[in-house]
Amino acid sequence: MAFCLAAVLATGFAAADVLPPQAARLSERFQSNPGAFDRTDAPCEGQGVGNACTVPGTAFEGGGPGKCERGINRNEYRFIDLRCTPDNPPQIDRQMASQPYQADSYMCADILREPDGRRTLAAMGLVCETPAPVSDRFCKGQAPGDSCVAQVRVGDAVVPSNGICKSEIETSSIYRRGRQQLTRPVVLCRPETDPVPAVLTPVGAWRKLFQ
């Protein structure tokens, strides 16, 4: 999603984040052993890195044929996970306004202490109160719970997909004296059925011997 602070958001975060001690060891194992993984999702159970797989569901729901690909679990930095990644993930041009986002109370107080604080907030596309919900183009004029039809691009094809307008809280972040989280309410056209969370199964010790 386009956001006027994209250039700021893309820099400085790695240095600002403090990673747990095991992150370096996990990263080293990930790099040194291209076949190593600790857990798999259901479509990649019994498969290896690069094998074909299929994620259940429509393209709008995130489904479709793909390949088993490794990734570091960045919530805990304890596992290398093998997940089925669709070959052609859906592209949805929601055409949403890029501003405003709400800054938290501490960031607002800090900026408003400056002589031109309100002008600074406006220039950054930030507000201190909860802004009005921003709708994507498929839910313009619609209320949460109303039906919608999203235009989902899969490869070269555009597939009309039925959905429901749903209220969500969208987050972004900015680097200002450390990383600061920004939020705003949005209304998005989403699949009628909520996606089933992926269940990751640990790989047995016997199979790990052959990685």
Image (spheres, rainbow, N blue to C red):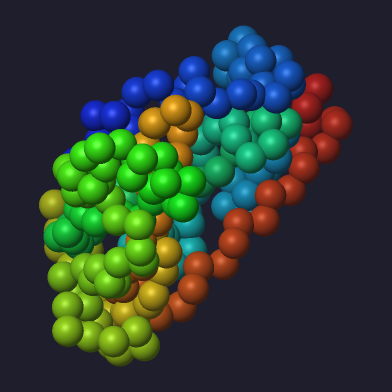
Nearer to the camera, 116 or 13: 116
Instruction: Compare residues 169 and 90 and report the one nearer the observer.
Output: 169
Q: Residue furthest right?
A: 205
Q: Is residue 159 visible?
A: no
- Above or below, comparing residue 97 to residue 38 in the picture: below
Q: Position of residue 190 (x, y in %)?
A: 35, 72
> Would you identify the image quadrant in which residue 164 lies?
bottom left
Residue name at image x 69 percent, y 36 percent: 76
Residue pictured at 62% horizontal, 18% vertical? 27
What is the quadrant of residue 181 in the picture?
A: top left
Residue 163 is at least partly visible in this image: yes
Q: How many marks?
A: 0
Vertical arrangement, residue 64 with respect to residue 68, above or below: below
Task: Decide if residue 33 is on the left or right side of residue 136.
Answer: right
Locate the C terminus by quadrant: top right
Q: Position of residue 4 (x, y in %)?
A: 19, 41
Residue plotted at (86% across, 31% down): 205
Query: Residue 174 at x, y = what percent?
Result: 37, 37
Residue 34 position (above or below residue 67): above
Work out whether residue 138 or residue 66 is closer to the camera in this orientation and state it: 138
Q: Position of residue 202 (x, y in %)?
A: 77, 42
